Image: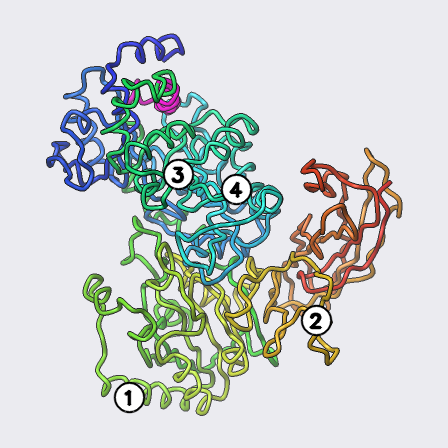
Amino acid sequence: MQEKQLQELLGSLSLTEKIGQLVQVPGEVLNAEGQELGVREDLGLSEEIIRNAGSTLNVVGAKRIKEVQKAYLERSRHKIPLLFMADIIYGFRTVFPIPLALGCTFEPELLERLCEVTSQESVAAGAHVTFSPMVDLVRDARWGRCLESTGEDPYMNSLYAKAMVEGFQKGMSDGAKEPKGMASCIKHFAAYGAPEGGRDYNTVDISERRLRQEYLPSYKAGVDAGCEMIMTSFNTVDGIPSTGNKWLMDDVLRKEWGFDGVVITDYAAIAELVIHGAAEDQKEAARLAMEAGVDIDMCTGCYANYLEELIQEGRIDEKQLDKAVMRILKLKNKLGLFEDPYRGADEEKEAGLFLSKENRRLAKEAAVKSMVLLENREETLPLAAGAKIALIGPYADNQDALGFWAIHGTKSAVVTLKTALEEAVGAENVMSAPGCETILEKDYHDLPAMQKQYGMEGWSDEKRQAEMEKAAELAAQADVAVLALGEAVLQGGEGGSRTSLTLPGDQLALLKKVREKAAKVVVVLFGGRPLVLEEVSKLSDALLEVWFPGTEGGHAIADVLLGKESPCGRLSMSMPRCVGQMPLYYNHFNTGRPYDGITPNRFFSRYTDCENTPLYPYGYGLSYHKAEYGPVTLSSHIMKKGETITVQADITNTGSRAGIETVQMYLRDVAGSVVRPVKELKGVQKVALDAGETKRVKFTITEEMLRFYGKNMEYCSEPGKFQVMIASDSSYDMQAEFILK
């Protein structure tokens, strides 16, 4: 449809029909036949608004979507198709590792491929828009939604945001006969990952400089990559909730960045402006959101019930409404829905794509690359050929490997670690027992209700004792005990904030008991956030962080344990020694009294009961090869504006196995008009090294890498001294210097 035709369509709509385009109804309002189930009391929507609603969420499956769309269009005066949106975060039926794990790959190209495959499955299921990627920067492991973020670094998060948007939307607008790609939605705008206390939905209060320097770059990268939609965040920004924040949504997003796509709220966020205390009632909330530039009201009655009244009163200009409606119509047009309202929905294609052999292969590759080997004392891993394995722990034979937010994934298709090990070494070489439950009531206030809701079994005290004894007996009989431990799925995700980051339930007690009996102990750690692992580390001969690894997690873990694959993941978030260190991140400020970790003096920026440093730093990860880094050299020690400097170092694999080394380049601005971080990641290269091989790795330093928001909020570089390092993780000291003139 041409622009002129869209304008004509807009002009033919009644006020109610226009408002309807801005209303998103939950999927349960429409049944599989597309008939209204009646007015939802909690939304207060009229039947007329429901008949004209512009979009719905989490209605998926080709057959169901075609039925709903057909019935909807039959009752539509103008035949404007519904937009079908869904929470498709890190896989559809084939589920990949959680984004926090994918951040450990340091491979944006891989994330692009994963999102393209996810899009293919989703389009076959009839979905038009995915509420992904989530690009919120996160530095506090207490926050439950860590699992949806790619980590704590602005540079890498920006690369991942671009890659994921391009992956989801690949081919979306190329005029292909068969639909390709789906619209991506960058979320949550903005700074949702910085809530006080790590508590979800809580207040965010940061300076504009920090917001622009550290939190906004990943959203901007997604916008620059062409994302079609932005989702507002639940939190405040400078005391104003994002959903009603005109400076954020209009001045920055639209005018400064040039975003001309659709802005949608998070679930019920307009109504929550009242609860925040930013609006007296839902009518005022609707006015604030519309003036801020919010186009779609997700699952409240605010726009539906009050926009017409606000326009009639002259408090909202109908031109504002028209702009919002046009943005939605343009997205529907870009997706080709006016020509094919059933875009891509195809039961036969679903059957061929869902959990296909190729998609599973990619899921396994991603799981392997996202695992992080934290400890490997005396080369415990890979396991010796023919070793008798005692596989113990609540994740030993557990299909809960998808994480909290893979709501469309097929749990029954998950390969467990027990299944994979038995396939690899034979069932006769694997003895298995859960040993304990994943979680107890002390770890989760609402656990009884959750157990009932999710059909979880609670053990008796007698069973707990018997299972732990059985596990210890198996450990004593084996050459190695592999303990599959971790936090419960329920403990993470949205609303899954924690004040304790230790292993839940009796898992630590199980580890201690097995340690007494086992010759060797390997801990395989599942979860959706960094945990406090100091005691776990001490009790382990090897420690492998596998996160929630997705559909093919079992096969991937088995291959790494047995040495068929080498671990190459690097931490996307710093691992704390203690929860009291939160928030914890590598690119912090130095302070006027930095602690050197040695001097016995209390008058430094330090804790008296814990080291300042993380247990495992950002960018850290071991492998089965060993790399040594040579001296860092610069092509020049003077950089003039408009010029570049080359920095290089030789990397040698001193081990006996080939491997992939993730080489990281960090910069430090020694002194600025405002305080600068102790270091910032500015380059990454993944280098394949054969045993004994040396390769020279080069990075180009540009003046753009040295820019920041200075004293007067200008974005520029400042002349002065800079330091550089090339290293395997963020914990090393700077190694060379140059001057920017």
Q: Residue at x 38, y 24 (%)?
A: 331
Mark 4 or 2 closer to N-term? 4
The span from disc 3 to disc 4 (Cα, nearest Å) is 15 Å
CB of mark 2 within 8 Å of CB of mark 1? Answer: no
Judged from the image, the secondary structure of the residue bearing numbered disc 2 is loop
Residue 92 in the image, given as x and y percentages of width and height: 34, 46
Considering depth in this image, is 453 or 199 the residue closer to the camera? Answer: 199
The circle drawn on residue 161 is: 4
Q: Amino acid at mark 2?
A: Phe
Q: Nearer the viewer, mark 2 or mark 3?
A: 2
Amino acid type at image mark 4: Ala
> From what the image shows, is residue 103 above or below residue 218?
below
Q: Position of residue 329 (x, y in %)?
A: 35, 20
Query: Disc 4 or disc 2, which is closer to the eye?
Result: 2
SS class, disc 1: helix
Q: Is residue 430 magenta?
A: no
Task: Answer whether labels 3 and 1 touch (C-beta < 8 Å).
Answer: no
Between circles 3 and 4, the one closer to the viewer is: 4
Q: CA distance from mark 2 to mark 1?
A: 47 Å
> Where is the N terminus found, in terms of image quarters?
top left
Determine if residue 347 is in view: no
The Cα–Cα distance between marks 2 and 3, rounded to whole angstroms, is 51 Å
| Residue 604 disc label | 2
Q: Are marks 4 and 1 in contact (CB under 8 Å)?
A: no
Q: Compare marks 2 and 1 and give the one earlier in the sequence.
A: 1
> Which tag, 4 or 1, sits closer to the chain's start?
4
Residues rendered magenta in the picture: 322-340
Residue 448 numbered mark, or none? none
